[in-house]
Image (tube, rainbow, N blue to C red):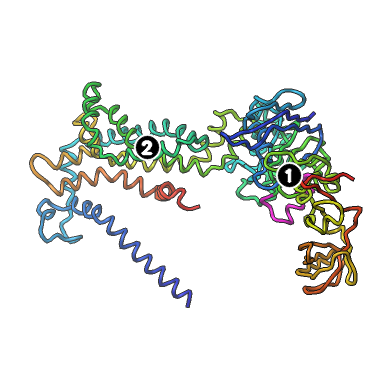
């Protein structure tokens, strides 16, 4: 009897989880399907899910009109560059907060997090003016810098949560064993925290890849990443849904594939510290 | 060599003084146990000796040299932690080799030493496993192995057995005592378990709220506790502490009688009371007896003493082995 109840409950849970999963995935699925439709079918008032004339013409058109590899490379450089720079700053910061906390550590962490609650448009004018004066507009260096700042609070928080799970006694044991601070970080802390550093990196690459506000505002051509590539299909001739969808699919495909193969790491990174 | 001397060593965290200035001398080759209840400062004292905490005042000398400001690795001490503190990403071999690698020793010498330690501690069968694949006792042995390869002048143990089950704890206690006899190196051992202290120590340091209450050999502490705190802490089951008219009859405001120093009888006794709980272990019998005007006393009889809940028994303390304490709780000599 108890087994039956457990089985029923599990089936309901699975059904609900699948329903939510499909609901969340549906816009992406719709975008991918639309990218294979003609423009007429894409804006049809009675759209069909799978029953339409599949075509590759949108992809051919998008490829001939835009230089996809250049946008792609810009996205790679900006996303990975900002996360690597962020990690270089955040690892020592999170180490200090986790292992030598002061009375202010909690406050500093909360303050860092609070910056994520500020609407980016609030600092748009000063950042735009600084970028203009320093010649950083439409440059990859400038975007790497700004996305590092945007994601740094999350990187520090994730690493801090991860480092805090590492027992301080292990680092003390290393100190007793004669390890210098450098050896302690290289031989003990980093290998132990590697899964955490990897999942932090992964999640933040995805966040940086998807970041649209700053990448759209601060670039035009030279440093334009895939967000600009998508946006270029929503102007000036009007909206072309099928081509827009093809461009979107091409923009999200790399990150979708990356996410698919690293699901385990991502879930671990996101739930770390929540359960023992 | 492995003598450790503390001179007026004190530790404060902010405004809180956890260790008031204290003096202590640990001789070369001695097995010294710091014992006391949770929060008495015994682990802090050990960490001050290790160099993992900075002293607020005073001087720590190791082998006659001032080590107060030396970093942990330069003190020539090795520590075994309560949580074992093994490196989870390294094999047993690499864990034990780590301090030697940090010391810049060549690989051949490292291998020889690691194999030697593994043989001493019976670690050979799982030398290439990781700590996660070992039992608690095996992990503790690896932690000890990591400590002995350094050939330190003294070992520091911070409650090393408290994560083990009772049977394993007994075995490891013997192993550590044997290791001490084999190596003849100074060992400083922290525990809250007075049985560990009594069975392993050459010298026990009883601590309360950062103060040293008494220093002495296990039997000195058992026979002549300096005050009520030590009297109640050393000995299992704990000493019966009796105050009021029953104590005054023996010429002291408070007296202490150990459970094993009372004669049990069905017919007669200085104090007569009703048995509340009786524990029959075969080798011993423990009785909790409610005596009117005295309180609840624990009595111990060697072998089997036939008494059950509700029986009336007589208890006669041995006056030669009775402990007398003054109004301040200090031992009255004689």
Give the residue displayed 22% in from the left and 33% down from the top.
A124
Q: In this view, does A110 lie to the left or right of B305?
A: left
User: Looking at the image, which is closer to me, B79 or A206?
Assistant: B79
Residue farthest left in this picture: A237
Q: Residues within 10 Å of mark 1 (few under 14, many from 20)?
A: many
Query: Which residue carries the number 1 mark?
Result: B35
What's the residue at 85%, 72% (across, down)?
A: B306
Task: Please report, as a chain letter, where disc 1 is located.
Answer: B
Q: Residues within 10 Å of mark 2 (few under 14, many from 20)?
A: some
* Chain identifier of the residue bearing label 2 in the image: A
Above or below: residue A15 compared with residue B193? below
Q: How many marks?
A: 2
| Mark seen at residue A112 | 2
In front here: A37 or A119?
A119
Q: Residue at x 34, y 37 (%)?
A: A151
Q: Where is residue A210 in the image (x, y as percent from the top left)?
A: 28, 42
Work out whether B196 lies above or below B105.
below
Quarter assignment of residue B275? bottom right
In the rendered view, would you say A124 is above or below B237? above
Is B175 included in the stretch rendered in magenta? yes
Which element is circle 2 on?
helix
Q: Quadrant of residue A9?
A: bottom left
Q: How far apart are marks 2 and 1 (CA)?
A: 44 Å
Q: Is residue B255 magenta?
A: no
In the structure shown, which secondary structural element does the residue marked by tag 1 occupy?
Answer: strand
């Amino acid at each position: 009897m108890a087994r039956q109840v457990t089985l029923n409950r599990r089936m309901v849970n699975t059904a609900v989880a699948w329903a939510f999963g499909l609901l969340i995935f549906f816009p992406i699925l719709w975008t991918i399907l639309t990218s294979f439709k003609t423009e007429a079918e894409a804006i049809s008032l009675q759209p069909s899910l799978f029953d339409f004339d599949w075509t590759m013409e949108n992809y051919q058109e998008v490829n001939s009109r835009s230089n996809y590899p250049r946008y792609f490379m810009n996205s790679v450089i900006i996303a990975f560059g900002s996360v690597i720079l962020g990690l270089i700053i955040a690892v020592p910061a999170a180490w200090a907060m986790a292992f030598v906390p002061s009375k202010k550590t909690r406050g500093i962490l909360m303050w860092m997090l609070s910056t994520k609650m500020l609407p980016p448009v609030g600092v748009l004018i000063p950042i735009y003016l600084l970028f203009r004066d320093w010649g950083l507009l439409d440059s990859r260096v400038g975007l790497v810098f700004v996305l590092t700042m945007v994601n740094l609070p999350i990187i520090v928080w994730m690493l801090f949560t991860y480092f805090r799970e590492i027992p301080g006694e292990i680092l003390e044991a290393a100190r007793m064993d004669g390890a210098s601070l450098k050896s302690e970080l290289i031989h003990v802390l980093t290998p132990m925290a590697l899964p955490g550093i990897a999942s932090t990196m992964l999640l933040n690459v995805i966040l940086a890849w998807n970041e649209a506000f700053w990448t759209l505002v601060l670039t035009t051509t030279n440093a334009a990443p895939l967000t600009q590539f998508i946006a270029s299909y929503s102007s000036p001739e009007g909206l072309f849904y099928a081509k827009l969808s093809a461009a979107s699919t091409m923009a999200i495909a790399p990150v979708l594939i990356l996410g698919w193969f690293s699901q385990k790491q991502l879930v671990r990174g996101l739930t770390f510290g929540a359960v023992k | 060599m492995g003598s450790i001397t503390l001179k007026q060593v004190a530790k404060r965290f902010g405004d809180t003084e956890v260790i008031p200035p204290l003096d202590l001398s640990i001789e070369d080759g001695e097995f010294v146990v710091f014992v006391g209840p949770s929060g008495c400062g015994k682990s802090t004292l050990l960490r001050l000796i290790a160099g993992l905490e900075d002293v607020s005042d005073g001087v720590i000398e190791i082998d006659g040299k001032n080590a107060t400001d030396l970093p942990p690795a330069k003190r020539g001490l090795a520590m075994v932690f309560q949580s074992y503190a093994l490196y989870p990403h390294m094999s047993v071999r690499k864990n034990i080799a780590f301090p030697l690698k940090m010391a810049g020793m060549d690989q051949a010498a490292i291998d020889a030493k690691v194999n030697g330690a593994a043989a001493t501690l019976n670690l050979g069968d799982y030398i290439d496993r990781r700590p996660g694949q070992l039992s608690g006792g095996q992990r503790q042995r690896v932690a000890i192995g990591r400590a002995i390869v350094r050939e330190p002048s003294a070992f520091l143990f911070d409650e090393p057995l408290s994560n083990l089950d009772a049977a394993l704890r007994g075995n490891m206690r013997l192993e550590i005592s044997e290791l001490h006899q084999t190596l003849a190196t100074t060992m400083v051992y922290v525990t809250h378990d007075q049985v560990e202290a009594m069975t392993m120590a050459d010298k026990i340091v009883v601590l309360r709220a950062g103060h040293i209450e008494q220093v002495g050999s296990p039997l000195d502490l058992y026979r002549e506790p300096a005050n009520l705190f030590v009297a109640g802490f050393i000995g299992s089951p704990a000493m019966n502490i009796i105050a009021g008219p029953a104590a005054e009859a023996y010429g002291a405001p408070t007296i202490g009688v150990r459970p094993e120093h009372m004669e049990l009888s069905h017919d007669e006794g200085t104090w007569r009371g009703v048995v509340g709980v009786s524990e029959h272990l075969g080798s011993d019998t423990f009785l909790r007896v409610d005596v009117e005007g005295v309180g609840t006393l624990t009595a111990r009889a060697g072998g089997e003493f036939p008494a059950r809940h509700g029986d009336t028994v007589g208890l006669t303390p041995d006056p030669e082995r009775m402990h007398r304490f003054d109004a301040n709780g200090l031992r009255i000599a004689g």
